[in-house]
Amino acid sequence: MSNAALSQTESSTGADTGLGTSLLRAVAGRLVIAVPYLWLLLFFLIPFVIVFKISLSQTAIAMPPYVPVFDLSEGMSGLFASLRELSFENYLWLTEDALYFNAYVSSLMIAGASTFLTLLVGYPIAYGMARAPATLRPVLLMLVILPFWTSFLIRVYAWIGILKPEGLLNQFLLAIGVIDQPLIIMNTHTAIFIGIVYSYLPFMVLPLYSALEKMDYSLIEAAQDLGCPPTSAFWKITFPLSLPGVVAGCLLVFIPAVGEFVIPDLLGGSQTLMIGKTLWNEFFANRDWPVSSAVAVILLLLLVVPIVLFQNAQARAQEQGR
Amino acid sequence: MNASLSRFNIVSIVLGFAFLYLPIVLLVVFSFNESKLVTVWGGFSTKWYVAMFQNQGLMDAAWVTARVAFISATVATVLGTMAALALTRYTRFRGRILFSGMVFAPLVMPEVITGLSLLLLFVSMGLDRGFLTVTLAHITFTMCFVAVVVQSRLVTFDRSLEEAAMDLGATPVKTFFQVTLPVILPAIVSGWMLAFTLSLDDLVIASFTSGPGATTLPMKIYSQVRLGVTPEINAVCTLLIAVVTVGVIAAAIVNKRREVQRQRDEQAAQRG
Amino acid sequence: MQSLGSIRRDFAPWNDPAAKPYIVFDQVTKKFGDFTAVNNLSLSIYEREFFALLGASGCGKSTLLRMLAGFEEPTSGRILLDGQDLRGIPPYRRPVNMMFQSYALFPHMTVEANIAFGLKQEGMEASKIAERVAEMLKLVKLEQFAKRKPHQLSGGQRQRVALARSVAKRPKVLLLDEPLGALDKKLREETQFELMDLQQKLGLTFVVVTHDQEEAMTMADRIAILDKGEVMQVATPAEVYEAPGSRFVANFVGNVNMFEGTVTARDAAGASIDSDSGISIRTENAGDAQSGAKVAYAVRPEKIKVSSRPPMDTASNAAEGEIYDIAYFGDMTVYYVKLGNGLVVKAASLNSARLTDDPLTWNDRAWISFKPDSGVVLTR
């Protein structure tokens, strides 16, 4: 109660309710909030507004390659004229070409499937780590985090060498005689799944491990004492209690995976449509900034719900004082 | 959870870690490949390492990347720590929900969106793309990770330490620098290391926001990969991995030693 | 000459009309949103007192302490220290120091640095600081632990560092928040006496918050018993125990038997009470009870005798009942005697001899008796 009370008295002025020197306190307090706030407003929020604005304009052979939305060079009448020029044309364009729709759908499906696979792969690992002897756990934790510290790009690149038709996986399988024709994995959805699961695994394992580690194992013992077999105890007790970790892990994988670029670009081929790649091509290859912006806006709208879910999960975890 | 590893557990851990490390191991192994191919072993050689150091473009990119990472990590740590303080110490201020949203959203935001939006911002501000813009972009997206790390430390921080300091005559500002900061320093350092690595590793955002003369290493690697790979790339990657691994393991060892010493001290104190 | 309880103290500034209180809570209220933690509370504490704030959790005692230290401001009312209103003065400007329940030792500083912290904030010069720190270490007998860090100390040692740190600045008032809470029983007993010694030696005013009656009774000059943000009684331990002012206080401290009843007669020598349980009680301590008033007569178990025969002396109040339960503690036995109408009376007797010639067991018929001066009449 005392903490809440302290911050309650602080919050009205950002300082304690004393007089005089609380001025410095108030300034310091305001600074601590204001500086990052302003930074984020400028570099995070406003860019989104600009993206939206650009998505409403036309391409132009110019640098930057779009017609400015607010052209004040001709005064107010010019402004109104250019505002009338604004259109959702780019958005309509997106709906006309099936490519974009397919890309969105495909991205959501691939991200969804990959998230599920990552959960399947990550859960046993996290569970094993949580049940390991306490002295071993920090080591295991470090081993899981270590690949994360090495370059994302490098690790995806490594998979190219493994999954290529003449790559190491096929060499291995051919050598032991399991197959007699190289498997075509590169440039397929499978390669993307492998890539996403591999790269995002630490993001799934860490929250899961955190939730599982906190679980009181005597709950399982109590269940068994009351006649519950182990697998049943897992589904009835362990899994439900680890649900916050599952949710956090899935969101941490799903949301960025939808907009993933590097993995579909390096491992997927022309067959695999993902919106991140589409956006990149639209921007770098076609030099069509307005359309890229429109693509980004729609992607953002698609992800708003999961992002809000994620924020809520974060806030709830904070309150429970994780 | 307490310890009792079943066969299934052991198998899942071993397989899981094998899956995680195999590609890295293969990458490292093939960096010593005699032949030009990345997948067929031709014998042991370190020639690719030599070639790498002689590749000016690669070296320049590495230098740019190191500078960007260092500067952005440092600024991001300051901003992220402030954000974490703002979120944990001030429970009610105007626009808190918006602030909180902005701090945590970049954790999951697809990089193409962040990259594109920042680029458009720089263009409308009239900033030339280059070292400055890529650094600003990196600061923005890494500060959120720092904020998360520092915040989780602040949540468990014992406020009575600050009250004790104030009770003994220290003003709030002095209290922060003499008591709070030293105690949460490990978390701040972790945050810095996280921001550094994220910056070092970033491809997408850098591609959007960087400019001529400020090509980063991931951008260089990516462009080589598209053209065609030689084990030179493997050599670069191996070196990066080695540097990071040594750093992380060193940090872990230092930490472990400190933990063990601390436990020994506490036990000694209990006994006498 | 008779005195209340077996202890007599010469130090009693609260009885001296000329003495001015050092700390005054003047109609202090503290609200947290809708919740009222302290309700229009007034209290005076004198210099050099060892004062205890006693109460269950949620009674407002910690809030009072924190308001005195400066971590909370009263919603209304004043707090005066040596005549000065403390409103608006932040904690780092008050001549008051606090010993925290969790000790709050700075983990990144040595014992020396912890103790020196407050002195550095004052701007004391380095040589003087070193002197004072050495003095403090000697006071709490931790000289050879000077260079250690908190995690290298045991619980009892940490407590002593916290104590040394809080008195290093020689504050006029020391606040202690549940100082013995984290210690084991043996250490607690030792520390109780150490704290009392320290307070006497340094001549400080101590204000201690505790929920432990024993602590308060042992250490304090006066105790304020708090409930739901209000003061129920402020008195010496002996007064609190032997002359509680209300049913609440009587129940709160120690064990008590309550005989509810009506005053049937009232004269200069005392009163007669017809208790609801059928006993007629004659008491000398009638207080301000009027005839016809509904009162409770409170008697402590150790004042009640149990015997298989009725008492010889007719002045004693007596009643017959059946031994309902027995709790044997070795040094003491508590008999639960059920009277005719169902009221269970607790009677505690010291086993001062190894053998007894009046052994009592379950279901025996027994007589309880107590003298007319052994209880108090409570009107509240």
Image: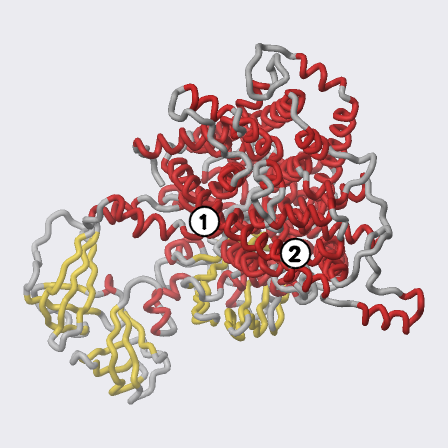
Where residue C122 appears, x then y in whole percent? 72, 46
Type of amino acid under label 2:
Met
Q: Is residue C260 visible?
A: yes
The N terminus of chain C is located in which quarter? bottom left
A276, above or below C319, in the image: above
The residue identified by callout 2 is B102
Q: Residue B52's image quarter?
A: top right
- The numbered dot on residue A245 is 1
Horizontal side, residue C8 vs residue B153: left or right: left
Where residue C19 appears, x then y in whole percent? 58, 66
Residue at coordinates 77% horizontally, 32% vertically from top-left?
B64
Where residue C329 appears, x then y in whole percent? 20, 51
Q: Say what secondary structure mark 1 lies in.
A: helix
Residue at coordinates 53% horizontally, 53% vertically from top-left?
A108
Q: Is residue C82 visible?
A: no
Type of amino acid under label 1:
Gly
- The numbered dot on residue A322 is none
